[in-house]
Amino acid sequence: MNEKTYVGEAKEAIHKLVSLSEKQNKLTLTLVDLAQSRTVYARIRSELAEERTSLAKVQTEDAAVRTELAKERTVLVRQQTKFQSRSTEMSERRTSLSEKRTEYAHKRTSLSEKRTSLAESRSSLSEKRTELSHHRTSLSRERTTLATDRTRMATKRTEFSERRTDLADRRTSLAQTRTDMSSERTELAQRRTEFSESRTKLADTRTSLANSRTGLSSYRSVLAKARTELAFIRTGLAFIALGTGLMRYFGLGPWTVLDGGLIVAGAFSAAFGLKGFIITRKYEKLLASKLEGYWTMSSGIEGEGW
């Protein structure tokens, strides 16, 4: 009865160990799958970072073209202000000529009044000449009214010319402010180009860090594989130890075949795990050398960026 109970307990322990090892293997496989999925996501993120760097380069080129156009626009605005100053000088000359014209019109009106006075004194000589003089005076009066109207229009024209000069001055001031704003815009464009260059440098550092992260994830997957192989070795050694212990405790008997099977299965699992562990150890060394190269590259890029 004692031997049967011991055998039952040993079988239950073996079944529990096998189930635990299977669960542990399943967990390691799920961890490996997760690591592979993370590597895929890291590759996608690195590709997106490269696309962002290319877009930043295109934006910097557009900013340089815009700065050149702003410089050409400032040159054209300066030429326009020169032409406007010349037009204001011509308008001032025109106003001076209009003032002289008004003076001549006043003199003409005074002469016409003198002529009317002479016509009135000469009217006593003859009625026909008086009639003609009346007609002439009426015509002269109309001419004087027209002259006054013309002088009035000349004054209005001078006022409009003055207003035009004021508007020209305002336009020149607005042009100067526009040139100042364009220069400020060029400065802002230069600052934007500097920020885009810093952004590209940060993108390079991010890509290098992503590469190092992918290397670390692959290194972790290799370590997980090594852990599973060590679990195989451990379970094999446990089976061998269990089989040898049962054989030494119970001796030879009908259960010796089962004990020998446990020892053989443990030897096979230990050999399989040892073989896989040696291969994964080689992969681990290769990945460790690659990770050292990534770290050196990332440290150099971070030193340049900061």
Image (cartoon, rainbow, N blue to C red):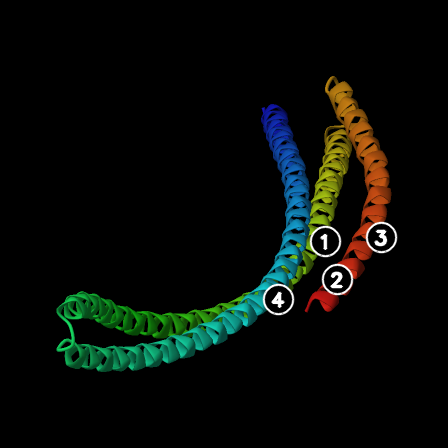
Q: Quadrant of the C terminus?
A: bottom right
Mark nearest the camera among 3 and 2 is: 2
Judge by depth and name the residue closer to the eye, 21 or 263.
Answer: 21
* Circle on res. 289: 3
For marks 2 and 1, give the CA distance: 8 Å
Q: Earlier in the sequence, mark 1 or mark 4?
A: 4
Disc 1 is placed on an element classified as helix
For marks 3 and 2, give the CA distance: 19 Å
Quadrant of residue 83 within the rendered picture: bottom right
Quadrant of residue 154 within the rendered picture: bottom left
The image shows residue 297 at horizontal and vertical percentages of 79, 59
Mark 1 neighbour density, 10 Å: few (under 14) some (14–19) many (20 or more): many
How many numbered tags mark residues here? 4
For marks 3 and 4, give the CA distance: 59 Å
Disc 4 is placed on an element classified as helix
Mark nearest the camera among 2 and 4 is: 4
Residue type at tag 2? Ile
* Residue marked by disc 4: 75
In the image, 24: left or right of 110?
right
Disc 3 is placed on an element classified as helix
The image shows residue 220 at horizontal and vertical percentages of 70, 45
